[in-house]
């Protein structure tokens, strides 16, 4: 009895059986039960070591996810997994910490699983050609691009929003609602990351609308910009002796934490302070008030990343896809 026999008997693909045997979550309960019952009934025992050592070519596509607590990445990953399976491949995920090296993790995964391609979901914005030379298969940067690095555009592919432009649009929404004293809550202003890009977009929106930049309205929270860090950063910003009517926050989850800090200190949203963020997570549509946010197209990002990777794997040229976010009105934004 082989894994192909199990798949045929259950009426599913080999990759689906593989995901069940490896405990992957992206399989329905009904299919999982059917496969496991067949495995038990036939006495099938998977020989993973022999399989990995013996094959010269796999059907595996690796996805290295940087940052285990990123809810936006979860939405992207779900769609990517479905698209990879639909195209006849098996997804091999590797979750790493926010401070871990995704390139090294991807290179190790490539050799362990004999990958055909790689998707980096989240990563640094400042790669060098020497660093990426560790990776020997086609790869796509998903949700980010090499804005601060030295990679030539024809040497890699990416799928993401324009973070600078999206931040600009978010702050412009606040300005359109009459706000001119606009604070910003960011991890860092100069870390060559998504934080710097969105911070520069914030400053550009102020500049283009003739609003003077006030350094006292910017709070750098540092670290990985978790919800606790955002909460503490917002608390410190409120302690400063400076007035503002609105806050631009880097992401939905951290905006939720910032709103909590405001409410705990007697500041109502949006009556006292308006809030806008970037992401468009489902959870932020159930907060009170509903968060006003620039929604990243998570499903499209996951799907396009897989499609682009397969094109490159088939010999196609590298491309850079920029997706358009959409503004979700919410209720955290008040017109002055």
Image (cartoon, rainbow, N blue to C red):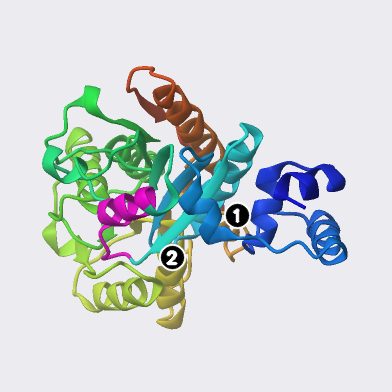
Q: In this view, does 2 lie above or below 288?
A: above
- Looking at this view, name the residue that lies furthest to the top: 316
- Apparent side of residue 74 relative to residue 141 in the rendered image (left or right): right
**Element type at mark 1:** loop
Along the viewing direction, whichever of 145 and 127 lies nearer the viewer? 127
Position of residue 134 measured from the top left corner of the image (x, y, whole percent): 22, 45
According to the picture, the residue beneath numbered tag 1 turns out to be: 282
Q: Does the magenta stretch include residue 108?
A: yes
The x, y position of residue 83, in whole percent, is 60, 36
Residue drawn at (33%, 49%), measured in percent from left and top?
A: 179
Task: Examine the rendered structure and indicate whether residue 257 appears above or below residue 197.
Answer: below
Nearer the viewer's eye, disc 2 or disc 1? 2
Residue indicated by mark 2: 68
Q: Is residue 129 magenta?
A: no
Observer-nearest residue: 62 or 6? Answer: 6
Snapshot quadrant of residue 129: top left
Specify which label sits upstream in the sequence, 2 or 1: 2
- Residue 319 percent across, percent down from the top left: 34, 22
In this picture, which residue range is highlighted in magenta?
98-111
């Amino acid at each position: 009895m082989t894994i192909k026999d199990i798949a045929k008997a259950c009426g599913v693909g080999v990759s689906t059986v593989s995901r069940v045997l490896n405990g992957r979550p992206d399989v329905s309960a009904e299919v999982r039960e059917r496969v496991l019952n067949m495995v038990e009934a036939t006495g099938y025992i998977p020989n993973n070591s022999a399989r990995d050592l013996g094959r010269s070519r796999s059907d595996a596509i690796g996805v290295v996810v940087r940052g285990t607590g990123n809810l936006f990445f979860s939405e992207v990953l779900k769609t990517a997994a479905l698209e990879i399976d639909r195209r006849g491949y098996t997804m091999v995920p590797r979750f790493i910490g926010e401070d871990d090296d995704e390139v090294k993790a991807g290179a190790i995964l490539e050799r362990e699983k004999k990958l055909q391609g790689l998707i980096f979901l989240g990563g640094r914005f400042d790669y060098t050609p020497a660093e990426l030379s560790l990776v020997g298969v086609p790869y796509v940067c998903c949700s980010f691009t090499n804005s601060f690095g030295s990679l030539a555009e024809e040497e890699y592919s990416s799928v993401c929003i324009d973070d600078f432009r999206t931040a600009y649009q978010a702050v412009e929404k606040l300005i359109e609602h009459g706000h001119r004293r606009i604070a910003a809550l960011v991890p860092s202003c100069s870390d060559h990351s998504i934080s710097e890009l969105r911070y520069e977009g914030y400053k550009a929106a102020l500049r283009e609308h003739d609003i003077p930049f006030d350094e006292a309205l910017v709070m750098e929270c540092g670290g990985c910009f978790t919800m606790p860090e955002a909460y503490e950063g917002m608390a410190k910003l409120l302690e400063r002796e400076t007035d503002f009517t609105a806050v631009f926050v880097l992401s939905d989850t951290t905006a939720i934490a910032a709103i909590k800090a405001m409410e705990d200190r007697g500041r109502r949203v949006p009556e006292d302070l308006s809030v806008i963020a970037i992401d468009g997570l489902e959870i932020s549509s159930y907060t009170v008030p509903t968060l006003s946010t620039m929604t990243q197209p998570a499903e499209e990002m996951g799907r396009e990343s897989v499609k682009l990777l397969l094109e490159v794997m088939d010999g196609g040229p590298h491309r850079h896809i920029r997706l358009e976010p959409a503004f979700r009105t919410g209720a955290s934004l008040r017109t002055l």
